[in-house]
Amino acid sequence: MKQRINALSFLAALTVLALAGTAFSQDVPVQRNPVVVHDTKHLTTAQAFREMTPEPWHNVSKVMIEHDRAPYPHISKQLDTVLQNEVLSLVSTTPGLNFDGITDAQGGGFVPPDTNAAVGATQVVETVNVAYAVYNKTTGALVFGPVNIQTLYKSLGGECATGNLSDPIVNYDKAAGRWVITMIAFNNSFSVNNSCVAVSTSSDATGTFHVYSFSYGGKLPDYPKVGVWPDAYYITTNSFPGGGFFTGADSCALDRTKMLAGSAATMICFQRTATDFSLMPSDLDGATAPPSGAPNYQLELGTATTLDLFKFHVDFSIPANSTFTGPTVIPVAAYTDACATTGACIPQPSGGEVLDALGDRLMYRFAYRNFGDHEALVANHSVKGSGATASAVRWYEIRSPGTSPSVFQSGTFAVGTNSLWMGSIAMDKTGDIALGFSASSSTLDPTIAYTGRVPTDALGKMESAKLIIKGTGVQQNSFNRWGDYSSMQIDPVDDCTLWYAQEYYKTTGSFNFDTRLASFKFTTCH
């Protein structure tokens, strides 16, 4: 057996140099004439979720459908000028709960798990492909589940009730105190494709829900990401007509007001061309709403030296007034996608397969916060590390999105010779930033950790990482899939406590992952 890296070596980190990039001066295109889609069915469940008879696991394949754009387009021959190269003090946080979540055996036996979780008033909800579980956020005790998420959509009939499910997202609408659960559903030929959306009727994630089915027709709406905004729930997807070739990103706004009331609802959509891929919608954190009338901000990777920012203004009363504006091009330090030539290159110790980094896209979430005197958004993605290191995590804080969007600070976080990937990032109410990720190497089983920074740190610098849990097994023969996303979320009650959800392996094998949920907060946030 190879010697495993020790905790002190694992947590040895490098410094970040700062970069501030201002958007290029340009004529920004405006797309009009959206597609308006009425829900195919909606209802309020007659029973609480906890009272429903769980659906069996009956999807046709243990491997969830995923379509990647190839080749990875973001390749730079320039050095990464924001690569961290100085060891800082251990990240200044106080740990909270740290416990196992849904396992592969409890989730129906699917890969990748698409692990994510959200935090509400008293509960934490975790979803994986294709399971749902609810925990007490104070004790970590399991309150409900795990059960097949399809149970929640059974009363809708159609593909939401009987089709193949994939790509779950759970979010908490903090302003309304409601849970928002989404998945895609499709038939075997991809000729029928739906988005299944559930909005809870209260802050209880085990109670009743308003459930909706929206049709995407013959387009598979792959890799959906969800942002909660005051005027709508925004869902971005990648379009694959008939499950075939990628034809462009799609962005839809769902009528939040109607869905909170359980009324008939519409979604207003803009189909983009194949030049746009994996848009990430902004997701509101904190008690302060965006400025009145602010559009939803959406971000994608541009070239190897840019980000593309879009603004989605929706008008449900007069849909023709809706607009999708952009891109506004924001310059960033040059980078190369992690695993740019192979897709899968993340190493594991002997016996483990190389893992997919999904380096061609931003990672969930694009978290937004209004501090009053400024607006800020944070984002991250996996980039090629230095030397032989397969992957590091590039992160950004973007300010002034409504007027002159620019990179206030950014960095590439690396830890020795380990590969870091599948990150998620968020800010607390004081401006502290937390970044969670997976880490692996030829001597380190895939492990979960996080780093962070406080506003008094030098711009672009993250403190040294803390361990959440060290993996004790590697993934084998699971089609090189890992992720495809994790989640860093904020507790809406204290607006300080951060929760990270990610996968790891306790025991070497195939289709036998575990997940972990961990909470912490910065010592200066009260």
Image (spheres, rainbow, N blue to C red):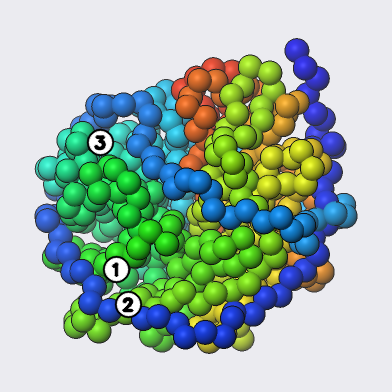
Q: Percent x, y for residue 494?
A: 57, 64
User: Callout 1: few (<14), some (14-19), or many (20+) C-alpha neighbours within 10 Å?
Assistant: many
Callout 2: helix, strand or loop? strand
Residue 17 versus residue 518 in the image, above or below? below
Q: Earlier in the sequence, mark 1 or mark 2?
A: 2
Q: Percent x, y for residue 51?
A: 23, 38
Amino acid marked by disc 2: Gln
Q: CA distance from mark 3 to mark 2?
A: 33 Å
User: Callout 3: few (<14), some (14-19), or many (20+) C-alpha neighbours within 10 Å?
Assistant: many
Q: Residue at the location (25% across, 49% down)? A: 241
Q: Quadrant of the N terminus?
A: top right
Amino acid marked by disc 1: Phe
Foreground: 250 or 98? Answer: 250
Q: Which residue is mark 3?
A: 164
Residue 507 in view of the camera: no
Q: Residue at the location (62% across, 53% down)? A: 75
Q: Which residue is mark 2?
A: 31
Residue 132 versus residue 94 in the image, above or below? above
Q: Percent x, y for residue 399?
A: 60, 77
Q: Which residue is mark 1?
A: 270
Q: Residue at the location (35% across, 50% down)? A: 246
Q: Percent x, y for residue 216?
A: 21, 54
Q: CA distance from mark 1 to mark 3?
A: 25 Å
Which of the 4 image quarters holds residue 151?
A: top left
